Amino acid sequence: MELIRFPFRRIGKEYLGTIWRPYAKVMIQGPNQRWVSVEMVVDSGADHTLLPGRYAAMLGIDLHACVKRALPASAARRISICTSR
């Protein structure tokens, strides 16, 4: 098995101390078969990948036609997501 190393970057608010997270540049292919380069946090325990809506048009995803769901972002706030395969 090959070991992959990711560079860490300092991100976020620092009132709880400095937070370093692993980043990677990945290529994502959308339904339109176009590949888009995206830099993102590496989360090896994630079951799903969430991208900002600004990538939808580049990937050929119609935000008006997709299934929308609400997810809890925190105890006090929910966010709306658009699911696509």
Image: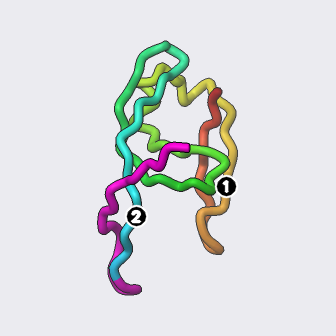
Residue occupying image coordinates x 33% and y 67%: 11
Vertical position of residue 68 compared to residue 46: above or below: above
What is the quadrant of the N terminus in the image? top right
Label 1: state its secondary structure.
Answer: strand
Residue occupying image coordinates x 54% and y 30%: 63
Q: CA distance from mark 2 to mark 1?
A: 23 Å
Instruction: Give the overall secondary structure of the magenta segment.
Output: loop
Residue occupying image coordinates x 64% and y 27%: 85
Q: Is residue 11 left or right of residue 47?
A: left
- Examine the structure image and report whether residue 85 is included in the region drawn in magenta: no
Q: Which mark is residue 21?
A: 2
Vertical position of residue 83 compared to residue 4: above or below: above
Vertical position of residue 84 compared to residue 48: above or below: above
- Asked whether 45 or 16 is in front, the reply is 45
- Examine the structure image and report whether residue 4 is included in the region drawn in magenta: yes
Q: Which residues are magenta?
A: 1-17
Q: Is residue 9 left or right of residue 2?
A: left
Residue 7 sits in quarter: bottom left
